[in-house]
Image (cartoon, helix red, strand yellow):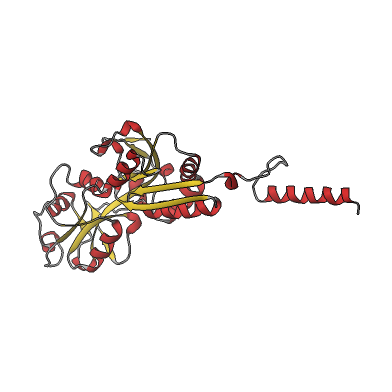
Amino acid sequence: MNKGSKLAMGIAAISLLLVGCGKATSSTSSKSSSAALSGKVTAVGSTALQPLAAKAGSNFMTKNGKVNLTVQGGGSGTGLSQVQSGAVSIGNSDIFAEEKDGIKADKLTDHKVAVVGMAPVVNKDTGVKNLKMAQLKQIFMGKITNWKEVGGKNQKIVIINRAQGSGTRATFENAVLKGATAVKSQEQDSNGAVQKIVATTPGAISYLAFSYFTNKLQAVSIDNVTPTDNNVETNKWKVWSYEHMYTKGTPDKATAAFLSYMNSKTVQNGLVKDMGYISIHDMKVTKNAKGVVTQN
């Protein structure tokens, strides 16, 4: 075989390899887009969104080895204030920027990446699986203090709240308390901490994103409506929020690519659902910053 034949065969083999891997399809594309993408992306904020963002970020870095992507919690308020100040690339939030005091929403760009349902959860020994909305409100206002008052065992109610600045708390209180003041109680700054404390504290009640439900807790229905994805999608279950990723100004290439990845079918139809979230593409309703819900 002469040198010309060997060269032709080599070029053909390389071309087939590139096409098979879903990379460049012409000899002029010598580098893949993932190889060209580089930079540092930092996302901070909502602990409800944190597991999804972290897993998606890990998968994204596997495909884009020159991108360093870090995901941290801290709460929605922290995420919004950090992205507004320019300290981070992305501010993760369970609430609209318009809902947070001190945040100039018109200076930020909202990227909705998922929907999260939230529900009251109790220690499994309380004996309660359903509450009326009015009862739930009275519990968190401190007016109902024993589980026997709502059909449970004779046991003191222990309220575990989220800290001020938590988007999960804001969403829950908007839907349940509707402007009333919550009783002073123990506060925790993450869904993960609440999950563990409610599971191990007799008489405990709090609220969690669906993605944090475990068989060690009892998720509570409200007015006999169960907290399920299907009920959130139609707004039959009313305690839910968008998961927002906010950016300030024009995002750099790495940040823009990650946000595009979050909205891709790979993430929305796979990872989002696998991890207990709801795809933004499955919602039959739309909610605005004032909490007004309309049919799509």
Which residue corresponds to the image point at 23% horizontal and 38% vertical from the top-left? Answer: 101
On screen, residue 195 versus residue 55, left or right, reads left
Quarter of the picture holding the C terminus: top left
Q: Quadrant of the N terminus?
A: bottom right
Using the rendered image of the protein, determine whether residue 26 is visible from the camera's viewpoint: yes
Percent from the top left, x then y, of residue 214?
33, 63
| Depicted 60 relative to depicted 197: above or below | above
103 shown above or below 126: above
| Residue 73 in the image, given as x and y percentages of width and height | 33, 53
> In the depicted view, which residue is nearer to us: 93 or 144?
93
Hey, which quadrant is residue 91 in on the image? top left
Q: Residue at x 38, y 44 (%)?
A: 88
Image point (55%, 45%), residue name: 37
Q: Is residue 142 left or right of residue 236?
A: left
Instruction: Judge whether residue 47 can be spotted in this image.
Output: no
The residue drawn where x is 39% and y is 48% is 43
Q: Position of residue 187 (x, y in %)?
A: 19, 56
Question: Looking at the image, is 74 positioned above or below residue 296?
Answer: below
Question: Can you give x and y, in whole percent of width and height, for residue 58 in the image?
Answer: 47, 55
